[in-house]
């Protein structure tokens, strides 16, 4: 794997050079590289190895490919594969396209390093590599991206600080950075240190994963990042946060407990419940905020907050069903985030905007993009028979089986609320009246369509055959010594009941064919133009309405927003806190450092006072 | 073959029964308003007339596709709901599948309506989704309580278990109340008919439909009603040991919603959501506490 990392570093230079010549060539190279990664990982199913790369001075980097990180490595390679395929056409007009691709390759290197690490030092080094490359990538976006990148870098620095402190604590106590030494000493560690380490790591994971209440960097980073980079940001980079949550919530504690002979670990204890609760809050806050957005990419960003909440909730909840669900949901979210962000990027590529209030009726121009978006949102909303339903079903089974009503309420809240926010782009971008200025918009070029369709196809297939979605994760459960969830080819079994996705799919398909049959049985309909709608007796062209006026999109959920108009917002609190801090320093600056008569008077008074005091005593 | 026969019987039976019943409910409403009202087979006439109309208007592919999806999704949902002692796929009457599969019908209809490019339709859908967010959360929670207590999420088993412990209507009265209010909202009965609101937004989602489109959506609505009322009967009134008992319970519940609806005025949409997140949600949590505290007996 260390060879691979060197190859990756060299490739980033090569890709830069190639992309200077021609953008598609660079993107194709990256696509081949990551495609080879996907293929190699699929072929290495069931195999594993560990290797070390000595750095000198007694330090060494350890890498490992094993059951516990296989799905994550695959995820990284897959996201890069799809996005670079998309980028073949998409980067043409981007100014810094070549450096964009080179940095994207470095992200690929960081995937290898973070998910493939078997010691904390490697984990941290490559985490930082990811942070800095993505900092530059975010700042390549539209106006405001510089500020967004700064916010992102600031939050990442807090996370990095927490992480390195925890790692140093571990190193000081165990004398090594290795995961296995940490697991060996896990029980023997003083509980204070262990708790601090875990809390620091989880806090870093929450920040990186964009979980409420430290989610706010996601909004600006997603909203202002380059359209091609947003899928990577949401599909891959927040997963680094989930991965470290997975390590500390599941991998280490359960491995340790298994060695001690405990086979079933359920985390109904206090701290884990608090974390699950934070996950639940993230679901709710992300949902409500997403409903009220009017920028499509920010809407999807908040949906990421909500889905990160599901992952954290499920992992923290800790029954074997919940854990399998949490891990599977990471993959489900990769697919849906890719589907939604790529289709938004496709729309922005052709129209130049992501503001939902400006668009409408684009389905006539971009039917493929519409289909991709439709399938992605059906999966997000957890509607059968797609992949999103499997994980929704599992989390609700897990919560209902143990009677966690409040968490179940939060899960339902997010899942039903998601109908609202996913429908808004569908209605306001793709359906409704099409403004005249978008009359000649064309469908996106071939490679963009291809990459989106791969995602769509996978969403459908994994939904009908949940075996392939869940098998890697039940294997993780076996590997760490947990009782795996029972699955069949198209069925999932829980303690409460069973689910047969193939049956659901076939029944729905049958119903659909019946509808089609009834429809075709009767007289043929007449097709009309978009302005020929019910207008209370007026004739639309004659009263000189424009499509923009006759398209309901502004304030789509205004009435819902009124419910929350007086609710506190965490982001507003942060702003307030920041302004207090800057005011405080302003006072110091003004009184002491400003070249004004006031400053000198203050200084003189101070000196006088000190002198007087010295004289007096 | 037996399976196909069963499926056909389910679909045709539900169609005949529910359309006749909704025709009869028009008579009930008429009597409340001191009118004579139409005959109870009037709705068959209406649907037939719509299907056989020579002209109908299409607003593009998604307008058609959404209608197929709505119809197909709802028919599929119908087959997962047990009717009395019968179910098409025994052991597959999963509550969560039913409620999410019902959503695919709603999504199809929403897509089709907005695809008509009429702002009234879009407004109606925005209201419908908002309202759904209101009522589905407390309703789902009432069922989560049941699933936890009885350790199964099969609707058929949840119905059967009530022959031992008594109807959930008596065992969990607060849940039953909440579920009934949510049922009214699901059916779009007053005071929760903001999405349709004929006088405000010209029938909302339905504004652009005509001919066979409207016919299909009417049938789809009747099927959805059959699923929703059926869920309430199964979950709270013990289903039915014979078909007849099930249908009698069904008729009583349905007519009750119709009668209450005839006496009500309309909420605004955010009032609906605020209402559902205030009282029903509190009542469900109280019910959960009671169940945790004293058990089900």
Image (spheres, coloured by chain):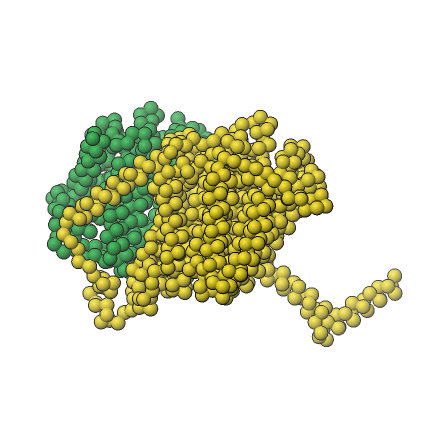
Q: Position of residue A220 (x, y in %)?
A: 50, 59
Quarter of the picture holding the C terminus of chain A? bottom right
Asked whether residue A335 appears in the rendered view, the answer is yes
The x and y percentages for residue A611 are: 84, 67
Kindly identify the residue that appears in the image at 62 percent across and 63 percent down: A582
Examine the image and state in which quarter residue B206 appears: bottom left
Chain shaded yellow = A
Q: Which of the 4 image quadrants contains residue B200? A: bottom left
Above or below residue A424? Residue B37 is above
At which x and y percent is residue B107? 31, 49
Q: Position of residue A399 (x, y in %)?
A: 45, 36
Observer-nearest of B15 and A435? A435
Is A378 displayed left or right of B250 in the figure? right
Decide: is A606 above or below A389.
below
Tell me: A126 left or right of A449.
Answer: right
- In the image, is B91 to the left or to the right of A353? left
Q: Is residue B57 above or below residue A327?
A: below
**Is A366 situated left or right of A487 in this image?**
left
Residue found at the very far top of the displayed protein: B164
Q: Which chain is green?
A: B
Q: Residue at x 51, y 44 (%)?
A: A73
Give me the residue at 23% from left, 58% from top.
Answer: B59
Name the one closer to the observer, B228 or A457. A457
């Amino acid at each position: 794997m260390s060879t691979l990392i060197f190859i990756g570093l060299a490739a980033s230079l090569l890709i830069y050079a190639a992309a200077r010549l021609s953008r598609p060539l660079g993107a194709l190279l990256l696509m081949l590289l990551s495609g080879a990664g996907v293929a190699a990982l699929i072929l290495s199913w069931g195999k594993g190895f560990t290797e070390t790369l000595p750095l000198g001075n007694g330090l060494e980097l350890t890498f490992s490919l094993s059951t516990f990180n296989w799905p994550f490595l695959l995820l990284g390679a897959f996201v890069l594969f799809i996005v670079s395929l998309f980028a073949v056409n998409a980067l043409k007009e981007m100014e810094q396209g070549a450096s964009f691709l080179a940095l994207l390759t470095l992200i690929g290197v960081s995937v290898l390093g973070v998910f493939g690490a078997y010691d904390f030092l490697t984990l941290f080094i490559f985490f930082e590599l990811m942070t800095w490359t993505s900092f530059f990538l975010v700042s390549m976006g539209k106006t405001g991206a510089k500020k967004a990148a700064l916010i992102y870098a600031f939050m990442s620095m807090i996370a990095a600080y927490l992480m390195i402190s925890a790692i140093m604590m571990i190193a000081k106590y165990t004398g090594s950075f290795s995961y296995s030494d940490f697991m060996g000493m896990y029980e023997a560690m003083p509980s204070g240190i262990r708790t601090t380490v875990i809390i620091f790591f989880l806090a870093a994971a929450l920040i990186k994963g964009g979980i409420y209440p430290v989610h706010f960097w996601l909004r600006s980073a997603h909203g202002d990042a380059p359209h091609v980079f947003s899928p990577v940001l949401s599909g891959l980079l927040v997963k680094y946060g989930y991965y470290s949550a997975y390590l500390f919530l599941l991998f280490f504690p359960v491995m340790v407990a298994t060695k001690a002979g405990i086979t079933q670990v359920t985390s109904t204890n206090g701290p884990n419940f608090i974390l699950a609760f934070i996950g639940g809050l993230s679901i709710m806050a992300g949902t409500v905020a997403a409903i009220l957005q009017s920028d499509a990419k920010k809407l999807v960003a908040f949906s990421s907050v909500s889905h990160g909440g599901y992952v954290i909730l499920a992992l923290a909840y800790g029954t074997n069903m919940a854990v399998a669900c949490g891990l599977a949901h990471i993959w489900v979210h990769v697919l849906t985030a890719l589907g939604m962000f790529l289709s938004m990027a496709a729309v922005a590529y052709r129209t130049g905007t992501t503001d939902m209030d400006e668009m409408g009726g684009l389905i006539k121009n971009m039917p493929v993009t519409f289909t991709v978006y439709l399938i992605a949102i059906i999966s997000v909303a957890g509607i059968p028979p797609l992949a999103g339903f499997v994980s929704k079903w599992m989390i609700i089974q897990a919560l209902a089986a143990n009677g966690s009503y409040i968490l179940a309420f939060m899960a339902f809240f997010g899942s039903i609320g998601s109908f609202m926010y996913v429908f808004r782009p569908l209605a306001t971008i793709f359906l409704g009246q099409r403004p005249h200025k978008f009359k000649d918009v064309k469908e996106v070029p071939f490679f963009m369509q291809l990459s989106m369709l791969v995602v769509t196809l996978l969403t459908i297939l994994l939904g009908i055959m949940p075996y392939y979605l869940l098998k890697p994760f039940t294997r993780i459960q076996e590997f760490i010594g947990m009782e795996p969830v029972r699955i069949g080819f198209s069925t999932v079994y829980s303690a409460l009941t069973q689910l047969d996705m193939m049956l659901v799919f076939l029944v729905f398909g049958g119903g659909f064919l019946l509808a089609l049959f009834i429809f075709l049985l009767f007289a043929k309909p007449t097709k009309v133009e978009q302005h020929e709608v019910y207008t209370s007796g007026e004739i639309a062209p004659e009263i000189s309405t424009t499509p923009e006026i006759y398209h309901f999109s502004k304030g789509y959920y205004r009435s819902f927003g009124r419910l929350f108009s007086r609710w506190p917002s965490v982001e507003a609190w942060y702003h307030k806190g920041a302004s207090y801090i800057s005011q405080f320093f302003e006072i110091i600056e003004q009184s002491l450092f400003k070249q004004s008569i006031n400053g000198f008077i203050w200084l003189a008074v101070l000196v006088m006072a000190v002198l007087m005091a010295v004289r007096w005593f | 073959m037996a399976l196909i026969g069963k499926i056909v019987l389910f679909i045709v039976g539900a169609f005949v029964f529910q359309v006749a019943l909704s025709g009869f409910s028009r008579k009930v409403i008429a009597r409340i308003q001191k009118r004579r009202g139409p005959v109870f087979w009037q709705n068959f006439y209406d649907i037939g007339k719509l299907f056989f109309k020579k002209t109908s208007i299409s607003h593009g592919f998604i307008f058609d596709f959404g209608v197929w999806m709505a119809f197909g999704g709802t028919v599929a949902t119908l087959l997962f709901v047990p009717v009395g002692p019968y179910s098409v796929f025994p052991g597959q009457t999963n509550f969560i599948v039913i409620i999410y599969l019902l959503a695919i019908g709603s999504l199809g209809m929403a897509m089709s309506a907005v695809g008509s490019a009429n702002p009234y339709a879009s407004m109606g859908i925005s209201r419908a989704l908002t309202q759904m967010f209101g009522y589905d959360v407390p309703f789902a929670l009432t069922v989560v309580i049941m699933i936890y207590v009885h350790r199964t999420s099969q609707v058929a088993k949840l119905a059967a278990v009530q022959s031992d412990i008594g109807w959930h209507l008596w065992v969990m009265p607060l849940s039953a109340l909440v579920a009934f209010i949510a049922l009214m909202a699901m059916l779009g009965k007053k005071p929760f008919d903001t999405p349709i609101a004929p006088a405000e937004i010209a029938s909302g989602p339905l504004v652009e439909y005509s001919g066979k489109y409207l016919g299909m959506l009417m049938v789809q609505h009747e099927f959805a009603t059959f699923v929703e009322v059926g869920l309430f009967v199964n979950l709270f009134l013990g289903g039915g040991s014979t078909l007849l008992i099930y249908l009698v319970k069904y008729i009583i519940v349905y007519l009750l919603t119709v009668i209450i609806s005839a006496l009500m005025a309309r909420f605004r949409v955010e009032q609906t959501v605020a209402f559902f997140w205030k009282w029903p949600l509190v009542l469900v949590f109280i019910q959960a506490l009671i169940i945790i505290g004293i058990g089900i007996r």
